[in-house]
């Protein structure tokens, strides 16, 4: 009796504080859990909220029973977490971490001793075992790798004849190295055995940094070229720089001096981008006598599209404009286009170049209006700049050069990415966008034959040879972002000329590039219906048998740092319309998964044509699109970017708010991983390995090195040495991987975000270099700068 009186007199501040915390957390879970339950969601939060709140009340009143109640609900929470998501460590964090920590605190003598009654050891024992179970579950989960595939493909040849070299082995003369866009180099100096020895060889700063008037989405997505003994790169503001490939020393620089009217008012900008330049040795081909002087004046050329709607030809030796091309070296691409908002029409990607033509499309701003410039693709004489043909998807049969005073079809589907070329077959292949606005298509010109697919044009005439659509009546911005990859594919019926198109929805469509027929089966699957009044949706959507399309998201896939924000993400999930991929946009808000960032975007894929293995970097990020009645567009937040503010869609009955599915803390509501690297055996169409890729080291105040698997924006490359390279992740690294099994071999630290596709080349010193532009990306929020980084193996002694 006396000891109990003494215990009553001891201060209970510490357990009381714990009780207050538990009561607040419990009530928050209870309130949110009731809302979730009414939406048809999990009952756990109601039950757990009541239990933890009861534990808190008992602790506040100094009752040891509060420990026992807490032990019971920690045990139940652990069992529930295991039942819902098994041993997935990152999924267990919001379910168990906070409760585990509070349980450990309650085991401290300072928390237990002031509590009454004295002789109730079962409460403490129960809590000890509940904490032990929760901790063991978390620790044990680290040994399980869900959604990863361990495998290996060690072959170096797959029975495909070697393609004759189109360029010196040590060069990288096109955006995808060759016009085939395979992003494969025959260099083999860097191997899985020595890749870990890679070191910085040199760095260069372009001096082109984001300015005060620049849009948020200024991006450094450039892949430099190695040709003519130099490196050629462009900057976000369309400047072209030639570097010495061994030292990074600047040789020449060209500044297009962007027009204020067309490039610096930024009213219609989506991305301030230059993904690359094109190189062409005009003098390598026979020419007419009449053009000999034109070619001799500028035999090797760099073609650069500028942000103020020009295409400029430069002398690759000197950086001076080729004055006999167009108007003193320049073609104005705004001709016959009609009105557009400054920044709303320009070419972000390098043109395609053939023996006689330079061919270019353009970016058109998404979701500004229903009356945007044409998506016309134009071919100019590579020597003189004279318009040879134009293919307007809104008037596809009329490819003769447009007459003065006429205008191309407004709002026709465009080609903003990188085309591929097969001169032997006489075709070029366009990855097509769609008609704007993205989320409202009721007024689009029918039929939408040439949108969201690949169209093959005759090089000489621009006439359509074939077309294949990958998304019918696209309402989700599922345009084809990646450059189509061309290769000779070893199939069960022999070697075929193949085209591989990686897409935002996750399918990799494999077609015979000579006629557009599927090599890998494509099945039309039923699609969700129930569009807004006045709109419609396609009854089916095509799915390739080779795909990395994610499974439908479930409520249990929602994530957060704590149980509270995970619960709020579950409530958000339940509040949205979601019937799986291709759920129609709505005023309620529609969950779009995969989001418009895509499983695959402009970075595309890399293919090793000898091994017949594809190296991929799929992303999985959910977005939300919410239609806003036109009468309310002006009342919403002003458009700042494509994912910030109300996109006006002027002329449509609805604007749209498009944003990632994020928690209240600004973290993804869906559980990680969000990004992988993967290998596909193209002879069997099987994923042979898949691993999480990248960390959040550079996205938190504490540099956490955990390999969570984060999104990447940029493409991969592979080499004959069996090593693949990829940057692009949210953390600032260029990584090397063993292409046979996906094992990470090396990670080179970058001074800024590397949201670009790397390339590799041989220097004059005989060493193999790997190059990446590290300038960051405004939309992803990575550190922005102006670095070009080269890595190589140490010099031999």
Image (cartoon, rainbow, N blue to C red):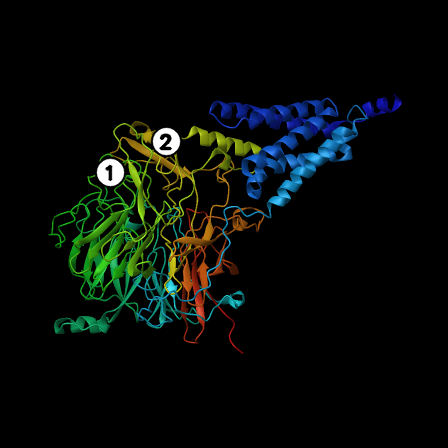
Element carrying mark 1: loop
Residue 28 position within the rendered picture, expressed as x and y whole percent measured from the top left: 57, 26
Residue positioned 23% across, 73% down in the render: 284
Residue annotated with mark 2? 636
Which is in the foreground here, disc 2 or disc 1? 1
**Which circle marks residue 370 in the picture?**
1
Residue 385's disc is none
In the displayed orientation, state which residue is furthest to the bottom.
Answer: 797
Query: Relative to residue 667, is residue 451 drawn left or right?
Result: left
For the residue carrying disc 1, how many other residues have a C-alpha within 10 Å: few (<14), some (14-19), or many (20+)?
many
Q: CA distance from mark 2 to mark 1?
A: 19 Å
Q: Quadrant of residue 138?
A: top right
Name which residue lies at 27% across and 48% down: 453
Counting from the top left corner in percent of width and height, residue 35 is at 50, 24
Using residue 732 as the reference point, say whether residue 595 is left or right of it: left
Is 453 left or right of 62, judged from the image as shown?
left
Residue 65 pos. (x, y %): 73, 24
Number of numbered markers: 2
- Left or right of 272 on screen, residue 124: right
The quadrant of the picture occupied by the N terminus is top right
């Amino acid at each position: 009796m006396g000891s109990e009186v003494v215990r009553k007199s001891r201060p209970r501040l510490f357990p009381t504080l714990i009780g207050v915390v538990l009561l607040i957390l419990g009530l928050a879970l209870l309130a949110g859990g009731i809302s979730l339950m009414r939406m048809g969601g999990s009952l756990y939060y109601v039950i757990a909220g009541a239990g933890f709140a009861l534990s808190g009340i008992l602790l506040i009143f100094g009752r040891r029973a509060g420990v026992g109640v807490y032990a019971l609900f920690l045990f139940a929470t652990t069992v529930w977490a295991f039942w819902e998501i098994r041993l997935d460590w990152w999924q267990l964090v919001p379910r168990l971490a906070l409760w585990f920590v509070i349980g450990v605190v309650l085991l401290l003598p300072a928390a237990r001793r002031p509590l009454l009654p004295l002789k109730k050891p079962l409460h403490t024992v129960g809590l000890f075992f509940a904490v032990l179970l929760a901790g063991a579950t978390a620790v044990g989960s680290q040994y399980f790798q869900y959604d990863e595939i361990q495998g290996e493909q060690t072959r170096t040849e797959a029975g495909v004849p070697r393609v004759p070299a189109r360029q010196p082995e040590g060069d990288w003369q096109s955006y995808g190295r060759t016009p085939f866009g395979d992003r494969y180099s025959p260099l083999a100096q860097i191997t899985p055995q020595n890749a870990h020895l890679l070191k910085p060889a040199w760095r260069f700063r372009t001096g082109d940094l984001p300015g005060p008037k620049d849009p948020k989405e200024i991006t450094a997505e450039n892949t430099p070229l190695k040709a003519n003994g130099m490196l050629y790169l462009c900057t976000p503001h369309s400047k072209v720089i030639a570097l010495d490939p061994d030292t990074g020393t600047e040789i020449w620089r060209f500044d297009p001096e962007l027009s204020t009217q067309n490039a610096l008012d930024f009213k219609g900008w989506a991305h301030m981008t230059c993904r690359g330049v094109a190189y062409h040795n005009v003098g390598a081909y026979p020419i007419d006598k009449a053009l000999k002087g034109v070619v001799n004046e500028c035999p090797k050329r760099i073609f650069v599209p500028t942000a103020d709607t020009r295409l400029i030809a430069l002398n690759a030796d000197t950086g001076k404009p080729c004055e006999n091309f167009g108007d003193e070296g320049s073609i104005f691409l705004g001709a016959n286009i009609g009105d557009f908002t400054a920044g709303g029409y320009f070419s972000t990607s390098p043109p395609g170049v053939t023996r006689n033509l330079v061919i270019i499309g353009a970016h058109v701003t998404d979701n500004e209006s229903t009356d945007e410039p044409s998506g016309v693709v134009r071919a100019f004489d590579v020597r003189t700049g004279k318009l040879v043909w134009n293919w307007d998807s809104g008037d596809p049969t009329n490819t003769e050069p447009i007459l003065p005073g006429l205008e191309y079809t407004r709002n026709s589907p465009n080609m903003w990415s990188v085309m591929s070329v097969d001169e032997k077959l006489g075709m070029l292949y366009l990855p097509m966008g769609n008609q704007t606005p993205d989320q409202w298509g009721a007024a689009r010109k029918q039929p939408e034959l040439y949108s969201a697919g690949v169209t093959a044009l005759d090089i000489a005439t621009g006439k359509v040879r074939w077309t294949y659509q990958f998304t019918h009546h696209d309402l989700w911005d599922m345009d084809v972002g990646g450059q189509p990859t061309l290769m000779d594919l070893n199939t069960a019926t022999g070697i075929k000329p193949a085209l591989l198109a990686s897409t935002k929805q996750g399918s990799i469509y494999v077609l015979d590039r000579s006629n557009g027929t599927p090599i890998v089966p494509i099945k039309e699957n039923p699609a969700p219906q129930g569009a807004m009044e006045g709109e419609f949706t396609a009854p089916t959507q095509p799915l390739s048998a080779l795909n990395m399309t994610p499974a439908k998201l479930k409520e249990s896939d929602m994530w957060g740092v704590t149980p509270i924000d995970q619960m709020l993400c579950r409530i958000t999930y339940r509040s949205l319309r979601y019937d799986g991929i291709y759920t129609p946009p709505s005023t309620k808000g529609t969950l779009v998964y995969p989001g418009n960032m895509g499983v695959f975007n402009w970075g595309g894929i890399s293919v090793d044509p000898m091994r017949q293995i594809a190296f991929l970097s799929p992303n999985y990020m959910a977005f939300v699109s919410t239609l806003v009645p036109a009468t309310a567009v002006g009342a919403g937040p002003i458009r700042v970017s494509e994912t910030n503010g109300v996109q006006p869609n002027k002329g449509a009955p609805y604007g749209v708010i498009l944003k990632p599915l994020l928690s209240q803390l600004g973290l993804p509501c869906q559980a990680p991983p969000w990004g992988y690297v993967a290998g596909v055996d193209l002879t069997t169409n099987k994923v042979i390995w898949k691993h999480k890729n990248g960390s959040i080291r550079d996205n938190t105040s504490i540099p956490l090195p955990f390999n969570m698997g984060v999104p990447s924006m940029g493409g991969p490359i592979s080499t004959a040495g069996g090593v693949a390279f990829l940057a692009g992740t949210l953390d600032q690294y260029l990584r090397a991987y063993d292409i046979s099994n996906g094992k990470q071999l090396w990670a080179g630290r970058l001074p800024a975000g590397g949201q670009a596709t790397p390339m590799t080349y041989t220097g004059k010193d005989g060493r193999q270099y790997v190059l990446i532009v590290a300038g960051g990306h405004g939309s992803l929020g990575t550190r922005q700068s102006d670095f070009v980084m080269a890595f190589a193996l140490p010099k031999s002694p």
